[in-house]
Each structure stands twice: as C-alpha cells, then as structure tokens.
Image (tube, rainbow, N blue to C red):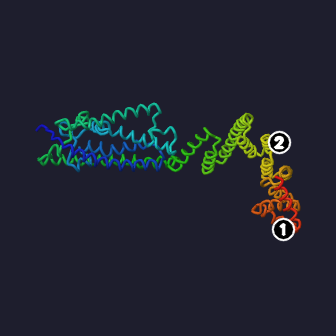
Amino acid sequence: MPFVPRPAAPSQRALAGLIDAAIIGVLSGAAVVTQVSFRGVVQPLWGVLLVMLGCAVVPLAAFKRTVGLHVMGLEVVNAHGRALDLVNAGFRELIGRGAFPLAYLLTLGGGLLAVRFGVAGDRTLSFGFGAPSQGAALATVACAVAFVFSLIGHATLFSRPDGRSLADLLSGSFVVAAPAIPEPTDLEEFDEHRAHQRRVLRNVVLVELALGLALFALPALMNHGGGERAATKVERLKLEAVRAKFERDPASGSLHAELVQLLGNAGRDAEAKEVTARHAQALGVKELDREGRLRERFAQQHDRDTAQQLISLLDEQNRFDEAREVYLELLGPTPTPPQLVGFGNWLATAGRTDEAIAVLTQATTLDPLVPLGQTLLGACLFRAERYTLAREHLELALADDPTDEDAADVLKQVEAKTGPLPAGGKRDLKRQVERWKRAR
C-alpha cells in the first residue's frame, strides 16, 4: 500500500520545536560551560553542534523523531514513510531549519562579548571558531543570510496544503502524525522489525556515547595533556589585553599599576620591572613635553595659573632652583608685600627656612601688617630656633589679630622654650601695632 502523508498541524510542530529547543539550549549551555571550565574560551561552537547532532540529527535518522516530536506524537519521514538518511536529516536540521547559522551567530556574539569584557584576546572574535578574520567575516554574512532564509522557509508550511516547510522540501521530508507506517501484523515480519529496532537502538546508544565522550570528556583529556585551565587562560588573556592597552599608553598610571599587579600574580617579576622602567621613561617624555608647552605659554602670557602649573611640575621633579626662578620671574622686579608673603610661604613649605625668613622679613618691612606676614615669619624663626625673635613677631601678629589661631599655637611652643613675654613688652608691641594701623 503506497504511503500517504498525513500533515501534522502547525501548532503541534511549533510545540515540538519548542520542546527540542529547550533541551538543546540546556545541553548547549552545559557544553559551553564544560569547554570553558576545562580549556578556557576555546571551541564552544563545536560543542553546540555535537549537541544538535545528538538531540536532533541522530534521533531523526534512527527513530524518525526527536523528544519533542515524540511528545507531540509526530514523525519526520521521507516520501516512502521511512526515516531520513543521516545526510538528509543533518541537512534538514542544521541548514534547512537554520540551526547551524544560529549557533554560529550566537557563539560569534559570545566571542565579541568575551573580547569586550576582557576575557578573550582580540583575535577570538568567533568565540573559538578558529577562522581567519576575513573567513570569519564571510562566514558571518553567509550564516546571517542562511538564517534569514530559514525563517522565511518556516513560514511556507502555512501556505502549502501538505504543510511542508522549505527545510522539508529541500530534504524530501514530511512531518506527519505517528506512526507514519503501522507496525507489521505478520508475526515473522514483526519479530524481524523488533530485531531491527533493537540493532538501531544499540547503534544509537553507541553513537550518543561517542558524542557525549567528545563533548564532555575530550576537553578534560586535552587539559590533562597540557591544556590551559579556564582560570589560567582568563588571567593570561586579561594580561594580554592590559598589556596591549599599556603599549598604547605607557604613561598611564592606572594601566601601569594593573599590569604590574597581573605580572606579579603570574610570578613574572622581571617583566614587571621592565614595565615599571618603561612607564617611568614614558612619564619622563610626557612631563618633558608638558614642561615645554607650559614654558612656551608662560613666556607668551606670563599668567599666574600657567606659572603655578610649571612650578608644581618642577617641584614634583625636585628641581627646586628652576621652580624658584619661575616664581621670581612671575613676581617681577617689584613684588608687593602679599606676593612676597606667598613666595615666603612657598619657600617655607619647600624646607628653605632661611630663604623664607629673608623674604618674609622683606614683606613685613614693606608692610608690617601684611596678612599672615608676622605669623609666617614667627613660625619660620621658631623653626630656625630663633625663639626670642619668633616670640616678638608672633606677639605682633596676635596684637593685630587676637583671633589668629595659627599664631597662638606657635606662640605656645615658643613660650615653652623662652617663657612668656613680660607684660611691659606686650604693651609696647601693642602700641607699635596701633601706630602702624594709624599710619596706613
């Protein structure tokens, strides 16, 4: 009796596809995790393809059905109601239904994310697919086109009376209600049919075991044979990514610190020292360039902001004399008392106490009541262990401003060395301050 296909309802096919997709998705995730756990980011695409072979292609070629089709009571058969051969089953599932293009595009997207977050090198764009960059680009375009055609092909089953999709037409398959062909009623034929089913089942079990071994055991064997574990590979790839960034900007302090730490964690101390030397050299070149630009701008504008930046840069490099020359050039030939106080404070901060005393003395001579002049001069004199003179200037500062806490604090330390100034001396200093105020 000739075989007459009974097309399956689209809703049944859709539910069967969802069941199979869920199973393949879970097993594919396990395959990727296994590959990454044992070998780092290597070849998850091949693991996904092995899952598809084991869950879709082999069951179709052997039993006419996958798990989803079995649950929904459907079968995929050829024009004679028999199971598809392995080639047509593979073509139908991997190409016709878009499984291979989708797997490639998903693993490519995973590779791009891995590169973006620093767990893969720049060449791992196909997430371990291993194709050259131009080949990977061509494969990406081809897979994108094939996947779009597969989506269009799925829609054809709604417009055809036989319910066949483009994948069915290309592979010569039909999706029908099970069983496509009833089991034989003759006892001898039935026994032969059962024996054939047992042989097929045995062969399928062997094939599935081989696929499972290739999927889960092979990465472990590769790792045992000298492969790189995931944590080690991720650290290496991260180190390579940071090194590449450092090579582009060796003066970056953050990249230098991160790269030195990664090299230290890997026990590569000699390389860490080389990186530090390279960073210092790059910083020197960068600072020299910055210094040149600041000097040029200061010569043109002679502004305070540029001078302060240049002074700070020279000061950080312990080039104090050059910084002082810039400061003096900024002050000009006739600095005001407040400018001299600022210069004296800078000298004192730099540890040039004697020079600071000379400058602050000049400032307070020009204007005895210049803000902070007497306080800073008293503090510098105390530091130079000229306690008596320091006490006098600090008393003058407090006579001018009794709320000057800095002057009061230093005066306490001075009085611990000299004792307090007699009351008559304090009165004389206060009268002196009053005369200076009236004279202003």
Q: Which residue is mark 1?
A: 416
Amino acid under disc 2:
Thr
Element assignment for label 2? loop
Q: Are marks 2 and 1 in contact (CB under 8 Å)?
A: no
Residue 240: quadrant of the picture: top right
Amino acid under disc 1:
Ala
Picture coordinates of residue 383, whole percent (x, y): 83, 58
Is residue 287 at all visible to an observer of this figure? yes
Q: Which residue is mark 2?
A: 334
Picture coordinates of residue 294, whole percent (x, y): 71, 38
Residue 373: quadrant of the picture: bottom right
What residue appears at the point 46 percent right and 37 percent down from the top-left corner?
Answer: 130
As drawn, 236 above or below 293: below
Picture coordinates of residue 179, whole percent (x, y): 17, 46
Is residue 86 at all visible to an observer of this figure? no
The one nearer the camera, 19 or 179, is 19
- Horizontal side of residue 159 vs 303, given as left or right: left
The one nearer the camera, 239 or 319, is 319
Q: Quadrant of the N terminus?
A: top left
Can you tell which mark lies on residue 283? none
- Horizontal side of residue 125 vs 319, given as left or right: left
What residue appears at the point 15 percent right and 41 percent down from the top-left corner?
Answer: 6
Picture coordinates of residue 283, whole percent (x, y): 69, 41
The one nearer the camera, 147 or 78, is 147
Distance of mark 2 from mark 1, alpha carbons?
Answer: 39 Å
Neighbourhood count class around disc 2 (C-alpha, 10 Å): few under 14, some 14–19, many 20 upward: few
